Structure formats: C-alpha cells, structure tokens
Image (spheres, rainbow, N blue to C red):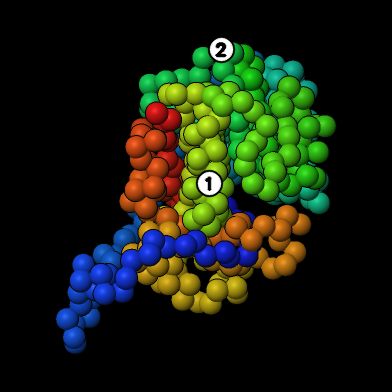
Amino acid sequence: MAPRLARHRRARRSAVPVAAEQAVSPTPAGVTPPSMPDRSLVPRPVEEPGEATRILFARLTGDDVAAVEAQLRDEHRGIWEYASEDQRQRLALGLGLAYGIETIAEHTGLRPVMPPNEVHSMAHGWITDTGGSYYLADMVFEGLAASGDPLAAGAHALDFSCSSGRVVRPLAAARDDVHWHGCDPNAEAIRWAAGAVPGIDFFLTPPAPPLHFDAGHFDLIFAISVWSHYNAVAALRWIEECHRLLRPGGKLLFTTHGLQACVFFTQVPDPAIEAKLGPDWITRTRDRLERDGHCFWNVFGEDGDWGVVDPEWGLAFFTPEWLLEHVTPAWSLRSYRVGRAYANQDVYLLERR
C-alpha cells in the first residue's frame, strides 16, 4: 500500500519540564536504556471472502463463473488454479468485470470501469480489484460484525478520504439499501468517481473540518490508509470531527501504521520512503514511537500528494496507547486487529459515546 506523503508540521507536546521528565523515568549514568522487544512478522493466512464478497458472488450464476474460467488469460490462470474455491469468489468478480463479461456487471450491480492512470487510485495495476477492493470491503463488514452492530437498512455510511472509491464501490453494490457517501481532497479523483459510479454521494473534502453535514448524520465512517498519513494534530482534529458526524453508538473504522508496519517495511522495503528518510528510517520510527507514541515524517515534496498539498499530510505511525490516551472517554474501543490490512496496517473500530 503505497503511502501518501506531505510536509511535517510537528504537533505541540504537553509542556512538561525536563526535570520532571527525568524524575519520572531516570536513567542512571552509564546504563543504556533497554530497547523495544523484537517483533517478528507472523504470516497471516489469506483472508477468506467475507460478507461483501459473499453477497455479490451469490448473485452470479454457474454460467457466469464458467465464462470467467473459459476466458482466463495465461497471466491469471496460475492465480485462479492456486486459489481455493472460496478465494475464487473474489477472483470471479474482479476478473469477470475486467474481461468484460456483461452478465457479471448486470447480476451484481458492479461497474467494470477503472480510473485512468492520471487519476489517483490505489487500484492501479490490480486487475483483481476491477469494480473495487473486495478484500477491504469485506474487512469493513467484518469489523462491524465483530461489534455486533451491522448496518441497518437506511443507514448512512461515509468512506472518508476515499480517493476514486475503491472500497465504497463493492460495499454500495452489496448493500444498496444503505446511503453511501465518499469524500476526498483530491478533486480529480472525486470528479471521476462521481461521473463513473452512480448511486454514491461523492464530494470534495475541505482542508480542515467541518464537513457539511449536521451532527449525528452518519452511522458508520470508515477510512482505509488515511490516519496512516496525518500528523498528530490533524489526526485528533479529524477524529473529533468524526465524533460530531456520528450518532451516539456510531462506528469509526480505520487502518493505520503501528509497530507491525515497522516490521512489515523491514520485510517489504519501500525504496521511495528510504530515498526520502534514509536507510535507518524504520529504526528511528520505532524509537519515536517508544518515546512519543506518534511519529510523523515529511516525505512529500512541494507538489504534494497527487497535487494535493497539505502540511499535515505525510507518513504517520502511532501506538494503541497514544490513540486511547487521546480519544477516551469520548470513544470506546470495540476491536483492534494488528496488521489485519495486508499484514501491514492495524485496524481499529471505535464507537462514539
């Protein structure tokens, strides 16, 4: 998941005198403070299809799936043959749309259109995400199911910082009885989504809160790889705005980088980040997480992220302790899954009190 990047504006820390800090956690002369425990990445099994995929796949006929198999291209045949029967559900949806099998779009309500290369999208190059990310849509429904509070008919749900709609598209197709919304600061992505994917309210996000909705308008807000980019000030400001936008009992589901992401990037290096921050950037990130709980890096140039320049938008990491210290008691934590998003980003589900 390629990170979005921006300038760093350092959050103000609480005014704690140096002497007081030393008094709380003294380090005797000549003694090296212990480092954080080593973490090893435990490979997570491929997540089986969830609610969104099951709903959409159930609308297909045997002829639809047979048509996909009959048209399998050489570069996709190995993926199909290696996949389990359950995993082929996602593949049938994505590949069927990509191959132009019209009945799959007709039966599911999915649209086969994909953003052009000049429009921001996290799905560029992912043919299996034609029509949207079924993996991430399943993850959203999974979080709600774990809370015991699934979306009711007529609910309002917002894909916050949705880009061109990769996640909200399959959700809206699966549950057309829900009012779906998507917002993003990237005007071109929103313009494309609004024109290409009807039935979803896409709108441009302002640089800072508030959004144009009354308090308590939404039942669910979800954000994929968004709080993994805010500095500390913006992160808390937008969480506060989400609190205003949600009804009491409403849910905020989001993914972000934490310690697991540090492990992930040691095993799946990102040359673009290393070029900006240096080869020891993961160690320095870990050290800042140990010290502050939140780490923000300036990794965007003056052109910003796909033309969106925001000094509070960069590469961010934080710990659960940092989050809970700042958001409770206004929020309660309903679930937390380490590395649930591609064995990289952690998934939080907060409930508005």
* Amino acid type shown at disc 1: Arg
Query: Quarter holding the C terminus?
Result: top left
The disc at residue 153 is: 2
**Label 2 – label 1 distance at C-alpha:** 30 Å
294 relative to 69 in the view: left or right: left
| Percent position of residue 257, x then y | 46, 54
Residue 237 is marked as 1
Looking at the rendered structure, the secondary structure element under dot 1 is helix
Horizontal side of residue 305 vs 38, given as left or right: right
**Residue at 46% over, 29% down:** 251
Say above or below: 269 vs 280: above
Whole-percent x and y of residue 309?
A: 71, 58
Q: Determine which of the numbered discs, if any, sits on residue 256 in the image.
A: none
Residue at 47% in and 62% down: 12
Q: Are marks 2 and 1 in contact (CB under 8 Å)?
A: no
In this view, the residue in front, 315 or 123, is 315
Q: Is residue 275 visible?
A: yes
Question: At which x and y percent is residue 269?
Answer: 52, 66
Front of the two marks 2 and 1 = 1
- What amino acid is at disc 2? Ala
As drawn, which residue projects farthest toward the bottom?
A: 30
Residue visible at 55% across and 43% down in the picture:
238
Observer able to see residue 90: no
Which residue is nearer to you in this view: 334 or 311? 311
* Labels 2 and 1: the sequence-earlier one: 2
Dot 2: few (<14), some (14–19), or many (≥20) neighbours within 10 Å? few
Q: Nearer the viewer, residue 52 or 100?
A: 52
Q: Residue 307 placed where, x, y %?
A: 76, 57
